[in-house]
Amino acid sequence: MVDHESVTKAVVPAAGLGTRFLPATKATPKEMLPIVDKPAIQYVVEEAVGAGLNDVLLITGRGKRPIEDHFDRAYELEEALRAKDDPERLAAVRESSELANVHYVRQGEPKGLGHAVHCARQHVGDEPFAVLLGDDLIDGRDPLLKRMIEVRAQFGGSVVALMEVEPEQVSLYGCAAIEPTDEDDVVRVTNLVEKPVPGEAPSRWIIIGRYVCDPAVFDVLEKTPPGRGGEIQLTDALMTLAQRDRSQGGPVHGVLFRGRRYDTGNKLDYLRTVVQFAADRPDLAAEFLPWLREFTAKHDES
Ligand code: G1P
């Protein structure tokens, strides 16, 4: 029997053009940019699997074939590493192909995040599902998605991950008006605004790229007109669901995240993320950190 209540599927939109990283992303998907020695998208798939979601649907588009190759077997490479007797690298190469059941669907036109999520409808069916945006990485030590799935089980409806940011940052994100619940880290979402103009933000709590959506979101997305930037916005569809009760696919709750999040969506944050990941790597930190200290000290002098 199909269980329509538990969350087993993750949807990862990966159709964006990655224009902020040109020319690096001219022929390489931005999702494949390395964070130390692993492409960013692998961390996202690992996070989904860590939360118990082994079925991962990637929404791709033109030029995204390297992502499919990354999660597939690479026989020639594996043979070469076996011949060289390099089990460590062989394991690293095989890991990404054994991680999850990865599926693909293409978003023909770039009509926005809401449209990308709607492309998952047939694969997801009538079950709640998670959405993970690749520009945000969540530290594996802070199990956000697991908590969001628990909150969905408790309250029904949909769940977004919220983080408090400085007022001048709010207009870069979807922003939520919230009310407390009996749970310390859970709020009821009463309003959502995609990238509010300064002065019109309902709070400083913004949506980071993690969602658990009720399947009712698909019908709503179909009727959601283009919003900010002329694109169909997931935020707008969730706003509609936030006003509904449980029998109609609502409500929307937020999990207040106070853990470690890394942004890879722009150059400066990407650089910060790479440095932080390197500093946490036992095989690199002992040499990398003293070098970094010396480098910055010298740089300050000059
Ligand atoms: C998207 C969402 C936005 C959310 C953000 C998180 O925006 O539309 O609501 O806050 O991701 O990273 P994007 O960054 O794709 O413009």
Image (cartoon, helix red, strand yellow):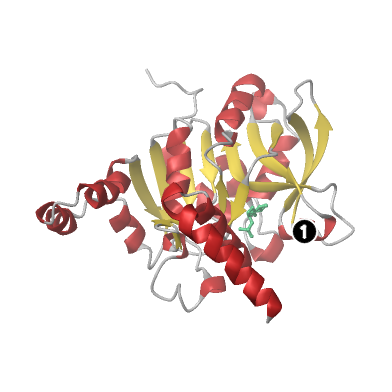
Q: Is residue 120 visible?
A: no
Q: Is residue 16 left or right of residue 86?
A: right
**In which quadrant will I find the N terminus?**
top left
Residue drawn where x is 69% and y is 75% of the image: 300
Q: Is residue 216 left or right of residue 41?
A: right
* Residue 241 in which image quadrant: top right
**In which quadrant will I find the C terminus?**
bottom right
Compared to 250, does 205 lie above or below?
below
Q: Residue furthest top?
A: 1
Percent of width and height locating residue 75: 15, 54
Judging depth in this view, the residue of 46 and 255 nearest the camera is: 46
Percent of width and height locating residue 78: 17, 53
- Is ligand 1 within 8 Å of the beta carbon of the residue shown at mark 1? no
Residue drawn where x is 60% and y is 63% of the image: 293
Percent of width and height locating residue 26: 43, 76
The quadrant of the picture showing ligand 1 is: bottom right
Residue drawn where x is 57% and y is 64% of the image: 292
Residue drawn where x is 64% and y is 26% of the image: 151
Compared to 67, does 247 lie above or below?
above
Q: Residue furthest left?
A: 83
* Residue 259 in which image quadrant: top right
Judging depth in this view, the residue of 144 and 174 nearest the camera is: 144
From the image, tell me which residue sits under label 1: 169
